[in-house]
Image (cartoon, grey):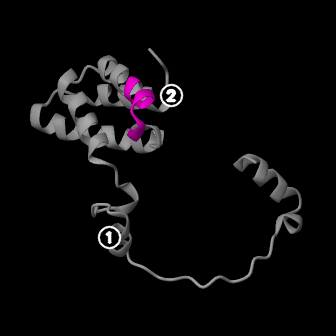
């Protein structure tokens, strides 16, 4: 069942879709405890933690292609289809990561214009292939 199907069913008759589940005791844990158990490294924003491979790959693409959005687009699309670490990342999160790396690169080298950043972000969101 997709999210849209669920919403349609719920809007038609919310009483029918209600399922009573018994209360389950919840153990409260901190983010640090979860990271310790899973072996993940701490992140300033736990919801946006990625592997270093993803961040370094995006950073390398931006530096290697010197801001040419078509080359970055080709590399990013090829990477999304080939590397396992990239397959679980949403388009929105990918856009944020790329924008962050582009902004850092722009500050250091001044290569990207605002127009180029918008084009790259649009390409990532649309998911067009070369």
Q: Residue at x 19, y 24 (%)?
A: 64
Q: Does the magenta stretch include residue 80?
A: yes
Residue 37 sits above or below residue 128 on the image: below
Q: Which mark identifies residue 25?
A: none
| Secondary element at image label 1 | helix
Where's residue 62, x and y in %?
Answer: 23, 29
Q: Mark 2 points at which residue?
A: 126
The residue carrying pointer 2 sits among few (fewer than 14), some (14 to 19) or many (20 or more) residues within 10 Å by Cα, namely few
Q: Is residue 79 left or right of residue 8?
A: left
- Please tell me whether the stretch drawn in magenta is mainly helix, strand or loop: helix
| Secondary element at image label 2 | helix
The residue carrying pointer 1 sits among few (fewer than 14), some (14 to 19) or many (20 or more) residues within 10 Å by Cα, namely few
* Numbered range of the magenta stretch: 78-85
Location of residue 123 by image quarter: top left
Q: In this view, does 65 lie to the left or right of 71?
A: left
- Mark sitting earlier along the chain (2/1): 1
Location of residue 79 by image quarter: top left
């Amino acid at each position: 069942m997709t999210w849209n199907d669920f919403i349609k069913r719920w809007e038609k008759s919310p009483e029918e879709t209600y399922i009573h589940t018994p209360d389950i005791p919840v153990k409260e844990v901190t983010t640090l405890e979860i990271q310790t158990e899973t072996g993940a490294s701490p992140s300033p924003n736990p919801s946006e933690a990625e592997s270093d491979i993803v961040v370094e790959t995006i950073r390398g693409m931006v530096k290697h292609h010197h801001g040419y959005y078509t080359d970055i687009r080709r590399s990013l699309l090829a990477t999304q289809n080939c590397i396992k670490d990239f397959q679980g990342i949403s388009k929105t999160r990918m856009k944020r990561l790329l924008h962050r790396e582009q902004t850092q690169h722009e500050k250091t080298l001044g290569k990207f214009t605002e127009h180029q950043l918008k084009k790259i972000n649009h390409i990532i969101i649309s998911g067009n292939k070369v």
